[in-house]
Amino acid sequence: MQDQFEFTPKLQRLTYILMGIGLLALIFGIVNLFGAEGEEAHHLANARLWSNLLINTFFFFAIALIGTFFLAIQYAAEAAWATTLKRIMEAISSFVPVGGVLLIIIFLAGTFHLHHLYHWMDPDLYDPASPHYDEIIAGKQGYLNQPFFWARTLLYLGVWTFFTMRFRKRSLEADALDPSDTSLHFKNVRDAAIFLVFFGYSSSTASWDWIMSIDTHWFSTLFGWYVFSGMWISGMVMIAMFVIYLQSIGKLPEINKSHLQDIGKWIFAISFLWTYLFFSQFMLIWYSNIPEETTYFIARISEYPYIYWGMMIINFVLPMLFLMDRDNKRNKKIVVVFGIIIFMGHWVDTYMLVTPGTMKEHGYIGFFEIGLALGFLGLFLNFVLRSLASRPLLVKNHPYLEESLHHEIH
Amino acid sequence: MAEGLKIYGLYNDDDILKQGAQALVDKGIKISDVYSPFPVHGIENIIGMKWTRIAITAFMYGLTGLALALLGMWYFMIMDWPMNIGGKPSFDFYQNLPAFIPITFEFTVLCAAHGMAITYMVRNWTFPGVEAKNPHPRTTDDHFAIEITPSENKKFSSDEIFSLLKDSGTVETFEK
């Protein structure tokens, strides 16, 4: 069966092995936490454990969210080419509810002071009588307070999950419809437009709430787009990897070289969007040279120069040199190699968003960090592959299916 | 038949043009060019056109722009008249590099785009003031022309080419 993916026991074992490595890393982190002597070492081990949980949860949750987002773009733009990829995007988006629950657990731990990633959750900061009173953070209380934070978080997660489930459900319903019935398709177009408007605002504010508030004193209005563009590349790479994997086991022969080239173009183009946003944020802060803004980059560039600039080179120079050429984008081996490198580059980018804020100069990428990332990858793949196997790989009766099958670009 | 003239077949539909071109190529005729009022997708593969190398020129023009912009700003802002950039009077090229990036980017794009456009026009000899060289005025309106150079098709006589063209669905054939 070419249009049905099977989640074989061998693949399941692979995801369980990855999850096993993650579990080992997690145990290692917890043992580290209880073995830490002295208040400072304990605090650091705690920050390391929860930072990495947040980094990986956010990273894979964001990839899943990009599945929904990219699907919504195709609907809203009434784009035909990606119809053959639709089931892959749906499968990736099926991780949204799982990632959402994991994020809630991490934020709950913050609310109950199990970790101190979010410095602003400390009530002493807002009390003028307390020795820890922080005038700057107290000034932000109108936005950064726990009830409002939770209301926002639950709103984002709720609305995103609602649309994700809705697109997924309707996709199966549409398979059973008469081919001439486009009513469901146009309902999807309308919903996609609503989702995109909400996503446009909420992706920015969510990254302020969940990531930027770690560096509580610092602020940047561009931050949301920067985080969003980074997660978009990771999501596109994930789609490309699924396409190439499925084709390597003989599935989805409907996807041709033109589809592959278009996915490659997206990876290439968004790498530039990401670099553009990185540099726009960096240059304005560098130019104006205001201490309260430059602290963010000093914490990254002086403490983690190799990681930070290495990640910049991987995420900007490699796609520019190797994904610009048309023949390279059509070459599966090149897309796989550079896709995986860029994917790791953006994981490091996410690491750099969180760690310098929570662990100051003490962060490093060791067994725990890599093991936990592999564990989350296993968890993500387990859910996504399971959901990929639960429905046919190609949609039926989609009004643009025929056009997508004949997709040809030069 | 006069020497050095080219043979043209005129079609009135792009699908007939593609079928006709395919039939001619299958018979072993080399088609030198096709004139059309709009892009006919797939025709380039049928007549075996070479892949464009304009992307390579664009990359080279871009590199030229990049180098020129960096060299220029190093000379203007650091070497010839050291500037205090953003309140950081380091007078050092590397340390002031972030300030030079936007202009470097813009100049790279400028050089790549203009270089590419000018190369295209010179290579096709189609810049303003050049006389149009389409074989028939209606190829800019609603007709499509196939161009066959007899010297590239030594195996066929001109009469054979004409008869093959007529069989392929042309509305008119002529020599020019």
Image (cartoon, coloured by chain):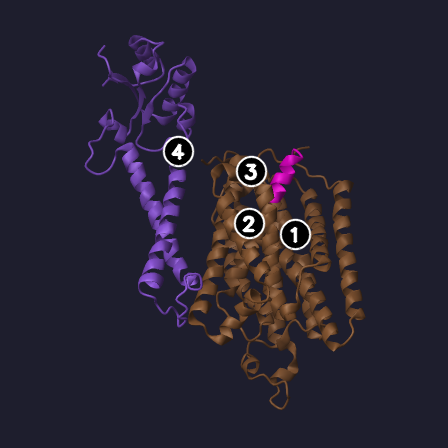
Chain colours: A brown, B purple
Gap between marks 3 and 4 measured at Cα: 41 Å
Q: Position of residue A25 (x, y in %)?
A: 76, 58
Q: Chain of mark 1?
A: A
Callout 4 secondary element:
loop
The structure residue drawn at horizontal position 56% and vertical position 56%, both measured from the top left corner, is A310
Disc on the earlier residue, 2 or 1: 2
Tag 1 near tag 3, CB within 8 Å: no
SS at mark 1 in the image: loop
Occupied quadrant, residue A99:
bottom right
- Residue A89 appears in the figure: no
| Mark 3 or 4, closer to the camera | 4
Mark 2 nearby-residue class (10 Å; few <14, some 14–19, many ≥20)? many
Return the x and y of residue A177 as percentages of the image width and height. 59, 41
CB within 8 Å, label 2 to label 3? no
Q: What residue is pinned by disc 3?
A: A179
Report the chain holding disc 2. A
Residue depicted at x 63% and y 60%: A58
Q: Are callouts 2 and 1 both on one chain? A: yes
Label ID, residue A71 = 2
- Residue carrying label 4: B52
What is the span of residues highlighted in magenta in the rendered image?
A: A240-251
Question: In this figure, which residue is indicated by the disc labeled 1?
Answer: A94
From the viewer's perspective, tell me whether residue B100 is left or right of residue A268. Answer: left
Q: Secondary structure at mark 2?
A: helix
| A245 within the magenta span | yes
Magenta span: chief secondary structure: helix
The residue carrying pointer 4 sits among few (fewer than 14), some (14 to 19) or many (20 or more) residues within 10 Å by Cα, namely: few
From the viewer's perspective, is residue A164 above or below residue B28? Answer: below
Callout 4 amino acid: Thr
